[in-house]
Image (cartoon, helix red, strand yellow):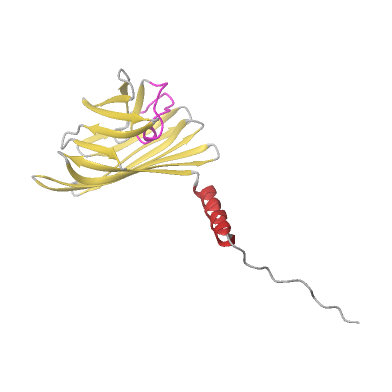
Amino acid sequence: MSCKNTAKPMQNYPGKSLIIAVLLLFSMEIVQGAIEKREYDITAAGIRIGEMTATRERIENQTWYTLHSEVSFWFFVRVKVVYSVKSLYQNNQLITTTVDTHSNRGDFKSTVTWNKDHYDVRVEGYKYTNEVSIMAPISYSSARIYFEYPHSVSSILADNYGILVPVDKNEKDVLTVTVLGNKNRFYFESGRIIRAVMHHPIKNFEIRLKS
């Protein structure tokens, strides 16, 4: 007595490929969903001089915020600057932040790191140094405000200078941050920065969220 295998191979049916594609896309979204990215153009006097990317990545109770920008402009000579900020938060407190600046005027670095009950500050910038400790926990720094409006604080960390700077919230959806006498204005929409006007001793510039 023989027994024939009556099982039929899986047949293709209309829509099968579409369903597989949707499932693959959904699985990719799950993996990538913890990372948010926002891209900006940087302009000076209406001329595009570079671009910036802001990212936020959540891993359990830790969150990484990063800013990375590259600009090139004329200021008596051609100036090129690559500027990166990487900040780690845990339970809404800043743990460490590092700023790396590479330019044809030199390379500079700033670090602010939580150490038991204070922050160790090490800043070596262009004609600027700072090693004064910060004694209170910090909940907002420059990279974080690109994703979250700082409702509950009166100051934020200016990472590249290693100092706390005051914030003014007198206008709705506008945040004014004063850094060493320079006023920078951040315009928010739905909790995210869509435009920033930055005042700088070398050159003023504007940051706009890409469409």
Based on the displayed image, in which of its 4 quarters is residue 19 positioned? Answer: bottom right
Image coords of residue 51 (percent x, y): 27, 46
**Residue 83 in view of the camera:** no
Q: Residue furthest front?
A: 14
Image coords of residue 48 (percent x, y): 20, 45
Image coords of residue 63 (percent x, y): 47, 38
Q: Residue furthest left?
A: 76
In the depicted view, which residue is nearer to us: 27 or 205? 27
Left or right: residue 33 compared with residue 176: right
Q: Is residue 31 above or below residue 140?
A: below
Count up the numbered dots.
0
Based on the displayed image, in which of its 4 quarters is residue 18 positioned? Answer: bottom right
Quadrant housing the N terminus: bottom right
Q: Residue furthest bottom?
A: 1
Q: Residue furthest right?
A: 1
Q: Residue at x 49, y 49 (%)?
A: 32
Q: Main secondary structure of the magenta part?
A: loop
Q: Is residue 142 above or below residue 155?
A: below
In the depicted view, which residue is nearer to us: 34 or 62? 34
Quadrant housing the C terminus: top left
Image coords of residue 129 (percent x, y): 26, 35
Left or right: residue 31 compared with residue 211: right
Residue 143 covered by magenta stretch: yes
Left or right: residue 121 compared with residue 178: right
**Which region of the structure is painted magenta?**
133-153
Q: Residue at x 18, y 35 (%)?
A: 204
